Amino acid sequence: MPEAGLHLELLRFGNFEVDLRSGELRKAGVKLKLGTQPFHVLSILLQHAGEVVTREELQKELWPDTFVDVDHNLNTAINKIREVLDDSAVSPRFVETLPRRGYRFIAPVEGNGVAATPARQESGFRYRAPRFAIWVGAIAVLAAASVLIFIYKRLHHSAPPAQRLLTRLTFDDGLQVGATWSPDSRFIAYSSNRGGKFDIWVQQVSGGDPVQITKGAGQNWQPDWSPDGKYIAYRSEAGEGGLFIVPALGGAGMERMVASFGFYPHWSPDSSQILFQTTQFAWLNRLYVVNLEGGPPREVLTQLASNCHVAAMSAAWHPDGRISALVNSGPIPTFWTGPISGEAPVKSAIPPELLQQIEEVAADKKSGGRVFEHEWVLDFKFSWAPSGRAIYFERTFRGARNVWRMRVDPQTLRALSIERVTTGPGRDTEFSLSPDGKRLAFTNESHHVRTWLFPFDAKQGKVTGPGGPVTPSGVDAWLPNLSPDGKKLAFSSARSGTWVLAVSPLPDGPGTPVVLEDSDLRDSPQWSPDSNRLAYVRENHSTRKMQIMEWSSLNRHEEALTPPSDAEPKVFDWSSKSNSLLMTQTNHDTGTSEVAVLPVVDRPRSPAVARSLLSDAAYDFYQARFSPDERWIVFEAVAKDNNQNSESAIYVSPAASPSWIRITDGKRWDDKPHWSPDGKLIYFLSGRGGFFDVWGIRFDPIRGKALGDPFPVTALDSPDQMVPKFVPTVALSLTQNRLVLTVAQDSGSIWVLDNIDPE
């Protein structure tokens, strides 16, 4: 074999120094402890810097006549070298692994004061003792020539951009999500359902097995590693739920509650406080900070709603200790940044030309250039770069969710430019920046939403068998409605960027568009009692005005029941005689959503006027439905002002009286109430336990009161079969023996992208 590499007595790289005669490794003059075998391996790699040294060659030089477990010994030696050098297998600075081939030392090396930049070549070698006098002259000449060539190239050529290396970190089935970096960037914590429920796990970025940190009851997720490295904060659904901290190395019984409510904790830069939001959804949030030294949480950025008239979707810390809130108001989210208390927050201005640039990316040419705002409803994650010169955020365009970077002026916070950081066609979500701002960890998620049909006993409140999907696999299906005869299904879907309303015969018929596909949005379909007509809302994509429409399955004709308006009407039920619709609409005097009745007149059609039934300035009302005998109306009420949680509870009101009867406590967001066919059970969705499921509660229609406590009907508590957490696009529908529900199937692994630093 030809001899190649460095054969010197003293080798230097970075701030390290290797003395081949004494067998010592030093860092900044301080001797480091490195075993004999790791030192020999490092010596070989250094003397052949830039060359691929195969595992077979290392075996011949180190263990030529001895039977040993070569793979184990080499892996141990390389891992020890990386540990001492604080190197990484994923993004190496010194020792690079070439799978199934060997290793290569990739950093510049100096021998006895003479520079020797590693050459990228493959060569055999023999491990020899250092021969300084023979080589130093030749190396000096080569080094001088290299310097001249380097200077020439720098003068005549710009440096090539750093290549971004994308590496997969987790390989388990299920969903791994919520990555967060340790302060030294050597570990990542995340939540995974690998143990049957979500818990917090920690894994080395360079490889190795993950370590489980939380083992208590309930789902444990949404981790955030403190900047000082001591704790991991997370959300737990155990008991009534809340925010907890646990030592970063874990430990049974070491967890401690810091807030009895809240979601998505974020440590302050000095690790003394935790910022969080009040819901797990990307809307209706209020922001709080809790101090680890004690005391109740206190609300922050209160001037967002009172003075700026916007609502926060999520929040994050600015590197200087201020707080930023994300408001989802366009293709580029807007950010408001201010101190915890006192001064009003400042909005990051976005130049018109930058906004136009992104609108061109967001617009769908097939729908006449319409931008689909519904795609952004779950894009709430964002983070500041450590330099304070860029904001990273999620954004979904035409079904692909990516991480974007917006550079800003650090003084004015005005946007300067925007670019896409990840470019995959799927869902890159819940990302985390490394502390040095150079690496990005994120979950590449597979997400499918379909309508499922379950065999059901509505009288007993029991699912009687396994369910299955009844909508096409390639299309997300939302807001399903089952016809009263149980034979047809109406649902909304997005196809090639266009929303359509589809009707499918059950159980196996293909979907058929109700109307020709166009750029208008049609949703919230509701079948008439005879199963022949659909009422729904149509929104004009140009004017943004909404109107209630009716479509007949007999003649496939669509006509308007109301003129276009700004009242944001939503249809939820028909009367038993099909002569009126139960709906909600905006009360322009109070600004809240009220329950109303809309007459459905016979032909020829004339504009109908809805009559208000239930209205309260302190609540928004939704999801109103008649009981089978039409004596009662069940509805959802969302409190407009609550000190801690955004409350949603189920109520019942007599159809002839505006009085209310509370049915649920609303602590975990109760939604989508439905009556059983006999009127003695109320079914609803609830976020109890961290996942949404169908729950039921018995109701006495004679006395008008709930009987007993709510009970679970479904158990969809795994990412491979769960109700989507964005409830406005979810629906349940039922007959005596069938239950229809929106179901999502999620899976995903954590990946790490290197070299993303914009500076």
Image: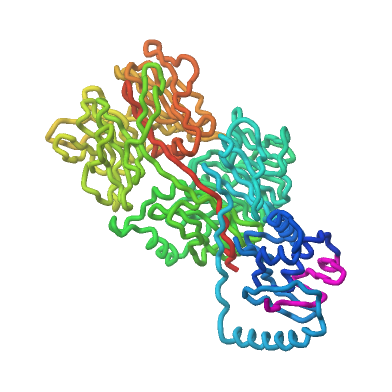
Q: Is residue 545 visible?
A: no
- Quarter of the image with the C terminus is bottom right
Relative to 161, say whether 403 is above or below.
Answer: above
- Residue at image x 53%, y 38%? 279
Q: Residue furthest top?
A: 702
Q: Is residue 454 visible?
A: yes
Q: Residue furthest right?
A: 22
Tell me if 621 is positioned left or right of 268 in this view.
Answer: left
Tell me if 360 is positioned left or right of 577 in this view.
Answer: right
Pick the front one: 506 or 67: 67
Based on the picture, tell me whether residue 157 belongs to the magenta stretch: no
**Residue 630 location, x and y as percent?**
30, 19
- Residue at image x 37%, y 11%? 702
**Residue 382 location, x and y as percent?**
55, 53
Tell me if 335 is positioned left or right of 154 in this view.
Answer: left
Based on the picture, tell me whether residue 10 belongs to the magenta stretch: yes
Q: Residue furthest left?
A: 604
Q: Which color scheme does this rendered protein use? A: rainbow
Relative to 551, say whether 26 is above or below.
Answer: below
Tell me if 634 is positioned left or right of 265 in this view.
Answer: left
**Residue 428 location, x and y as percent?**
49, 53
Number of on-image labels? 0
- Residue at image x 60%, y 56%? 433
- Quarter of the image with the N terminus is bottom right
**Residue 284 location, x and y as percent?**
49, 40
Please give the range of residues in magenta. 1-30
Pick the front one: 79 or 175: 79
**Quarter assignment of residue 511:** top left
Pick the front one: 213 or 643: 213
